[in-house]
Amino acid sequence: MAEEKDNCGGLPPEFCEQLNKEEQFIKVRLEKRRYGKEVTVIEGIEGNDSKLKEIASELKSRLATGGTTKNNRIELQGDHREKVRQVLEEMGYPSSNILIIE
């Protein structure tokens, strides 16, 4: 928390969090895994490990799928690219900063 206040010049935490969301550039892409399994990979969300896990938990819950966080990225089972965009927008990330890679 102390780091966020330093980066935002004394702004209230909720404004600081929104500014941080607007500065992030998020990439959402599909990877094919073994046996033809599809995995939606979300990269570019900044924050500590607990913040990433919190976002992953929200996505898994809203999309009714399994997933994990590793190497500063979120992996969800199945193809959820468009749904991920919608959920991230509802969480306050600007749609212009969310890139869906086909």
Image: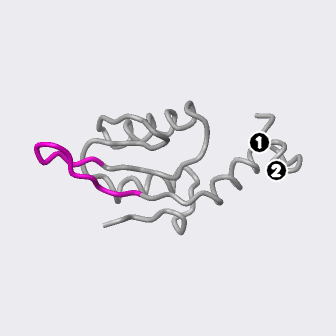
The span from disc 1 to disc 2 (Cα, nearest Å) is 6 Å
Query: On the picture, is 65 further left or further right than 53?
Result: left
Where does label 2 land, which residue?
A: 8
Of all residues, the one furthest to the right in this rendering is 10
User: Three-letter amino acid code at disc 2?
Assistant: Cys
Q: Residue at x 54, y 49 (%)?
A: 45
Circle 2: element type: loop
Q: Are marks 1 and 2 in contact (CB under 8 Å)?
A: yes
The x and y percentages for residue 84 are 39, 53
Query: On the picture, is 17 further left or further right than 87?
Result: right
The x and y percentages for residue 5 are 82, 42
Query: On the picture, is 37 further left or further right than 94?
Result: left
Q: Nearer the viewer, residue 42 or 72?
A: 72
Q: Nearer the viewer, residue 40 or 11?
A: 40
User: In terms of image quadrants, where is residue 14?
Assistant: top right
The x and y percentages for residue 6 are 84, 44
User: Three-letter amino acid code at disc 1?
Assistant: Glu
Report the magenta residues as a range.
Answer: 28-39
Q: Residue at x 82, y 45 (%)?
A: 12
Q: Quadrant of the C terminus?
A: bottom left
User: In terms of image quadrants, where is residue 56?
Assistant: top left
